[in-house]
Image (cartoon, rainbow, N blue to C red):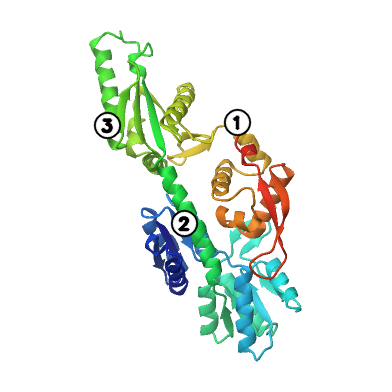
């Protein structure tokens, strides 16, 4: 399922487009009156949907800071096509003449292209949503409103053009001429198709096999008790019973590999849900199973059962060295659950050294690097533009262009040519990305 969160009109448009595309039964809409409700609505949809699409960058940013979420989060970007549509409406409203405007949200480069294509001088007053080139923090709605107020009261503009419903409502209530840029159906359709693909991939991943390998430490020479004593046997039985309860909690199947090693078969979705509970408050089946000293666990995920077993063995070996729980993923990454006593919670950390080196080379953190890999899996890596990457990765196009330049310098992305966009404007560079270079 796909969830859509946004103002009532934007949500209604997304649902209408979904019905036109034949995926209406797979899309659930939740409308808000205030952007502050975006996170609450997203959490309501989180247990039902594989992907949640926000109709703008601002609600997406609000919700992102109030995670974590099980679903993937995306947003519908405001594009050049949206701007062209707004300019046509403004010309019609002002007797064929384009008024002086102040603009927010849409990148200055996109605004400049649109005006130059029309043979007009670009507007001077364009405000980015982000605080600065190196500061991705989203501006407060009040600050964006104040920007338009100041420009209009100074006599610099005739109309304040905004992408934000809250800003538009405040400006109109104050008697200031304003226009709200809405998404075109084509932009919404493209975003929903991307989300539909991501949801299908998420369902496929959720059913991937998972294996939890458990070694009963108390059954080996690791205890001072005589292995044949009643106390040693009792402790071994208690440890085995804990594994039975773990298998039941994970709705999995348990099997004996040898006298000391047990394995629980489950699926990726169940394991990820258990890891999420572990990350929040050390609860859930993995939290309970990990509190004893009589066993060591390793978790493996894979495209096949043998692959999941092999990854679980790898994770178990690493865990026996450190005493911590490790999770080995299909792409070679290994996540480590470590206790952070200062915060009283667990956190996941990348431990696969080759992956760490590549992430460092690209200037990305391990988790951001993992998001990049997942985003590229949604795309045709033989023909990718910065816009494609921005939508799949959930970042602004200019940030995607910088990342694409970094990938090109690292020899991972190769320029293949250019293509024209759906609206007039500069052609976009098309890249081929060698994903194998990102996953040693």
What is the C-alpha distance between the residues marked 2 and 1? 34 Å
Residue 311 coordinates in the image, percent (x, y): 47, 29
Q: Which mark is residue 196?
A: 2
Residue 361 coordinates in the image, percent (x, y): 68, 40
Circles 2 and 1, Cβ within 8 Å, touching? The answer is no
Residue that carries the numbered disc 1 in the rendered image = 353
Q: Would you say 307 lies left or right of 88 here? A: left
User: Which dot, 2 or 3, sits closer to the camera?
Assistant: 2
The answer to whether 352 is drawn above or below residue 193 in the figure is: above
Q: Is residue 60 visible?
A: no
Circles 2 and 3, Cβ within 8 Å, touching? The answer is no
Category of crowding for the residue at label 2, using alpha-carbon neighbours closer than 10 angstroms: few (below 14), some (14–19), many (at least 20): many
Tell me the SS state at disc 3: helix
Earlier-in-chain disc, 2 versus 3: 2
Residue that carries the numbered disc 3 in the rendered image = 245
Name the image quarter holding residue 223: top left
Tell me the SS state at disc 1: helix
């Amino acid at each position: 399922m796909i969830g859509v969160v946004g103002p009532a009109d934007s949500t209604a448009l997304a649902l209408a487009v979904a019905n036109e595309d034949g995926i209406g039964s797979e899309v659930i809409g939740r409308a808000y009156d205030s952007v502050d409700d975006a996170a609450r609505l997203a959490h309501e949809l989180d247990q039902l949907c594989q992907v949640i699409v926000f109709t703008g960058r601002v609600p997406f940013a609000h919700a992102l800071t109030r995670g974590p979420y099980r679903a993937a989060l995306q947003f519908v970007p405001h594009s050049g096509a949206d701007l062209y549509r707004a300019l046509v409406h403004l010309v019609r409203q002002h007797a064929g003449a384009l008024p002086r405007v102040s603009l927010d949200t849409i990148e200055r480069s996109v605004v400049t292209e649109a005006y130059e294509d029309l043979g007009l001088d670009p507007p001077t007053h364009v405000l980015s949503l982000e605080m600065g080139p190196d500061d991705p923090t989203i501006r407060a709605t009040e600050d964006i409103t104040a920007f338009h107020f100041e420009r209009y009261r100074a006599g610099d503009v005739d109309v304040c053009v905004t992408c934000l419903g809250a800003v538009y409502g405040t400006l109109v209530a104050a008697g200031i001429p304003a226009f709200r840029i809405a998404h075109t159906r084509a932009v919404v359709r493209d975003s929903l198709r991307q989300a539909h693909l991501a949801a299908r991939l998420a369902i496929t991943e959720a059913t991937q096999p998972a294996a939890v390998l458990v070694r009963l430490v108390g059954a080996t020479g690791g205890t001072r008790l005589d292995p044949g004593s009643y106390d040693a046997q009792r402790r071994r039985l208690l440890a085995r019973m804990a594994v039975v309860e773990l298998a039941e909690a994970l709705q999995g199947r348990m099997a004996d590999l040898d006298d000391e090693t047990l394995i629980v078969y489950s699926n990726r979705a169940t394991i990820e849900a258990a890891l999420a509970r572990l990350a929040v408050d050390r609860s859930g089946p993995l939290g309970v199973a990990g509190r004893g000293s009589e066993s060591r666990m390793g978790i493996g995920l894979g495209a096949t059962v043998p692959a999941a077993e092999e990854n679980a063995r790898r994770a178990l070996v690493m865990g026996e060295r450190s005493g911590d729980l490790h999770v080995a993923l299909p792409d070679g990454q290994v996540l480590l659950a470590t206790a952070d006593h200062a915060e009283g919670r667990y956190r996941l950390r990348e431990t696969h050294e080759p992956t760490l080196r590549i992430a460092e080379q690209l200037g990305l953190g391990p988790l951001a690097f993992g998001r990049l890999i997942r985003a590229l899996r949604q795309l045709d890596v033989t023909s990718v533009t910065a816009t494609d990457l921005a939508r799949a990765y959930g970042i602004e196009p200019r940030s995607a262009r910088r990342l694409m330049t970094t990938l090109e310098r690292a020899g991972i992305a190769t320029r293949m040519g250019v293509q024209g966009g759906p609206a007039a404007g500069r052609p976009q560079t098309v890249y081929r990305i060698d994903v194998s270079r990102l996953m040693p």
